[in-house]
Image (spheres, rainbow, N blue to C red):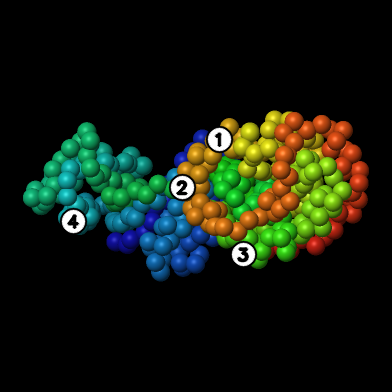
C-alpha cells in the first residue's frame, strides 16, 4: 500500500491518433511542476501518477495549476487481488467522514473477479456496517463519493480537486503577450495559454515616469502566470524615448493611439525573434478610447501577425472576476501605474483618421526607435 496523487486529463481524450503527442507534453509539464517536491511522475493506463513527494499537499496545489490537468485526487494504491485489504482501506478513508455516501467503482481490468456493481455493494456494506453512527448510503445525491478504480492495482480515493483544464502548454504554438500592470492583460494571457499556447511576455517600462515598483508589479503578475505555464520569459522594453517623442511631435489627441501602434510593432519584432506566431492583448471593445472598433483597426494595420483578443466581448466585471479566480487581481490593483497612463491626452481620438496618424508618425524615426527598444530590452526568466 502506498499513497500517491492520481492526475486526470480531460480534452486530451478527444485527440485520437495524436493523443500520444499531447500526453507526452502533459507528463513533461507535470514533471516540471512536481520537481520541487521530489515527486516521481509516470503515465499508466490513462492516468498520470505522482509518488514519493516531500509535501503532497503543496505538490497537488501546484499540479492543479498545470494546463491539461482536469483534476487531481489523493489516492491509495493497494494490491487488487486482496479484496479484504481493499475493504479495510475503504473503511480507513471513510471513518472520519460524516453524512451520506456511495461507492463508485470503475474497472479497466475487465477480467477482475468482481463486476463494478458487486464492488460497489460489497465495499459499501463493509463501510456502512462499521460506521452506521455517522454514515448513511445515498446512491442518488450523496455528499461523499468513495471511488475505487481497478487497474493493474486498486486505487481508492474520496476527494477530487478540480484543476486548470485546457491543453498542455506548448502544444498550441507560441504567442507574445503585451503585458501591462492592469487587470486585463494577465487574464488574456491565461486564457490563450490554457489552449496550449506558450507565452512570451512583452512589457513597456517608462522610467522614470513609471517606478521600479511598477516594473516589479508586472514581473509579479508574470510570475503568477508562470505557475500555470511552467515558466515564462518577459521582455522589459524601455519605452520612455518613444513616448517622449510621440508626446512632443504628434497631435495630442492621437498620442495614445500612436503609442499603441508602436507597442504592436515592437511586440511583433520580439515575437519574430522568439518564433511566436501571434500577438495577445487584453483589449475589450469600447473599454477605453484606444479600444473602439476604429482604433483597434488602426493598431491591427501595423502588424502582419494575427492578434488574439480573448476579452474582446467581456465587460470589466467579467474580467475582474476572472482575475480573482486565477489569482492576479490583488496584484493588478496595486497602485503602481504603467506606461499607458503616462502623457494621457485629455480628449483621445475615438474615431481616428488615418491621415492624422500618418502625419504624426512621419515626424518620428520609426525604424531607429523600434530597433533601439528591441535591442535594449531586458530579458527576465521566470
- Of tags 1 and 2, the one toward the viewer is 1
Q: Which residue is mark 3?
A: 213
Please report the residue visible at 60 percent of the width from the left and 50 percent of the height from the top.
182
Which of pointers 4 and 2 lies earlier in the amino acid sequence?
4
Q: CA distance from mark 2 to mark 3?
A: 24 Å
Q: Nearer the viewer, residue 330 or 32?
A: 330
Q: Which residue is mark 1?
A: 314
Which of pointers 1 and 4 lies earlier in the amino acid sequence?
4
Q: CA distance from mark 1 to mark 4?
A: 44 Å
Which of pointers 1 and 2 lies earlier in the amino acid sequence?
1
Q: Which residue is mark 4?
A: 96
Please report the residue visible at 84 percent of the width from the left and 33 percent of the height from the top.
354
Which of pointers 2 and 3 lies earlier in the amino acid sequence?
3
10 lies left or right of 101: right
145 lies left or right of 232: left
- Of tags 3 and 4, the one toward the viewer is 3
Image spot of residue 293 (x, y percent): 70, 30
Q: Nearer the viewer, residue 260 or 274?
A: 260
Q: CA distance from mark 3 to mark 4?
A: 48 Å
Helix, strand or loop at mark 3: helix
When the figure is inspected, residue 313 is found, relative to residue 165, above or below; the finding is above
Q: CA distance from mark 1 to mark 2?
A: 15 Å
Q: Which residue is mark 2?
A: 325
- The answer to whether any part of residue 362 appears in the image is yes
Q: CA distance from mark 4 to mark 2?
A: 31 Å
Q: Quadrant of residue 264?
A: top right
Q: Nearer the viewer, residue 184 or 277?
A: 184
Image spot of residue 213 (x, y percent): 62, 64
Helix, strand or loop at mark 2: helix
Which of pointers 3 and 1 lies earlier in the amino acid sequence?
3
Which of pointers 3 and 4 lies earlier in the amino acid sequence?
4
Amino acid at each position: 500500500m502506498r499513497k500517491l496523487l492520481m492526475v486526470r486529463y480531460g480534452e486530451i481524450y478527444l485527440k485520437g491518433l495524436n493523443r500520444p503527442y499531447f500526453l507526452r507534453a502533459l507528463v513533461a509539464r507535470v514533471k516540471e511542476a512536481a520537481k520541487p517536491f521530489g515527486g516521481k511522475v509516470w503515465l499508466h493506463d490513462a492516468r498520470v501518477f505522482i509518488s514519493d513527494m516531500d509535501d503532497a499537499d503543496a505538490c497537488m496545489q501546484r499540479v492543479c495549476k498545470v494546463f491539461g490537468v482536469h483534476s487531481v485526487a489523493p489516492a491509495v494504491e493497494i494490491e487488487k487481488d486482496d479484496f479484504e485489504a481493499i475493504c479495510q482501506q475503504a473503511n480507513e478513508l471513510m471513518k472520519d467522514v460524516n453524512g451520506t455516501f456511495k461507492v463508485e467503482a470503475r474497472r479497466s481490468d475487465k477480467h477482475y473477479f468482481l463486476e463494478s456493481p458487486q464492488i460497489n455493494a460489497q465495499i459499501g456494506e463493509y463501510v456502512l456496517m462499521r460506521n452506521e453512527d455517522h454514515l448513511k448510503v445515498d446512491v442518488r445525491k450523496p455528499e461523499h463519493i468513495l471511488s475505487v478504480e481497478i487497474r493493474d492495482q486498486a486505487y481508492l480515493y474520496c476527494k477530487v480537486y478540480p484543476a486548470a483544464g485546457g491543453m498542455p502548454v506548448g502544444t498550441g504554438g507560441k504567442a507574445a503577450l503585451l503585458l501591462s500592470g492592469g487587470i486585463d492583460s494577465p487574464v488574456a494571457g491565461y486564457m490563450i495559454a490554457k489552449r496550449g499556447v506558450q507565452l512570451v511576455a512583452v512589457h513597456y517600462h517608462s522610467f522614470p515616469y513609471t517606478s521600479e515598483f511598477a516594473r516589479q508589479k508586472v514581473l509579479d503578475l508574470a510570475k503568477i502566470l508562470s505557475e500555470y505555464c511552467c515558466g515564462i520569459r518577459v521582455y522589459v522594453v524601455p519605452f520612455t524615448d518613444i513616448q517622449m517623442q510621440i508626446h512632443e511631435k504628434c497631435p495630442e489627441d492621437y498620442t495614445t493611439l500612436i503609442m499603441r501602434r508602436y507597442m504592436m510593432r515592437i511586440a511583433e519584432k520580439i515575437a519574430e525573434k522568439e518564433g511566436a506566431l501571434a500577438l495577445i492583448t487584453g483589449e475589450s471593445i469600447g473599454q477605453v478610447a484606444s479600444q473602439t472598433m476604429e482604433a483597434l483597426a488602426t493598431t491591427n494595420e501595423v502588424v502582419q501577425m494575427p492578434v488574439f483578443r480573448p476579452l474582446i466581448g467581456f465587460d470589466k466585471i467579467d474580467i475582474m472576476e476572472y482575475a480573482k479566480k486565477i489569482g492576479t487581481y490583488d496584484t493588478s490593483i496595486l497602485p503602481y501605474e504603467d506606461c499607458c497612463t503616462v502623457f494621457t491626452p485629455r480628449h483621445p481620438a475615438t474615431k481616428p483618421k488615418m491621415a492624422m496618424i500618418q502625419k504624426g508618425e512621419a515626424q518620428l524615426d520609426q525604424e531607429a526607435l523600434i530597433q533601439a527598444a528591441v535591442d535594449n530590452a531586458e530579458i527576465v526568466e521566470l
